[in-house]
Amino acid sequence: MNLHLLAGIAVLLILVAVSAYREALRNEPIRRSRTQSARLPPADEAE
């Protein structure tokens, strides 16, 4: 196989993995990150 083809496939796989990771972070509930800092009010009371 051509080295450029292997590099292209590797880049595509990395982009797919990063995209899936960002999507998973976006769908994660906000409460989990807010539990570490007790100073912040809950998301419902902030608005």
Image (cartoon, rainbow, N blue to C red):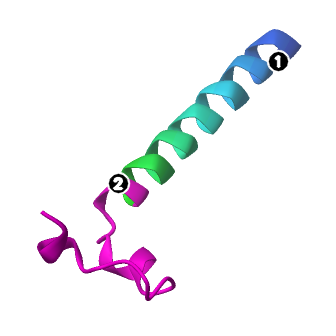
Q: Quadrant of residue 38?
A: bottom left
Which residue is under mark 2?
Answer: 26
Badge 1, how many Cα within 10 Å: few under 14, some, many 20+?
few
Give percent across and percent down for residue 37.
49, 82
In magenta, the rendered stretch is 25-47
Q: Is residue 4 left or right of residue 38?
A: right
> Which of 9 and 22 lies nearest the eye of the viewer?
22
Q: Residue at x 55, y 45 (%)?
A: 17
Q: Residue at x 29, y 79 (%)?
A: 41
Q: Nearer the viewer, mark 1 or mark 2?
A: 2
Outermost residue toward the right? 3
Rendered image: mark on residue 1: 1
Counting labels gives 2
SS at circle 1: loop
Residue type (three-letter) at the residue carrying disc 1: Met
Q: Inspect the magenta stretch and tell me whether residue 8 lies in it.
A: no
> Which of 13 and 42 lies nearest the eye of the viewer?
42
Q: Residue at x 14, y 76 (%)?
A: 45
Q: Is residue 22 above or below residue 27?
A: above
Q: Is residue 4 left or right of residue 24?
A: right
Give percent across and percent down for residue 47.
12, 63
Residue type (three-letter) at the residue carrying disc 2: Arg
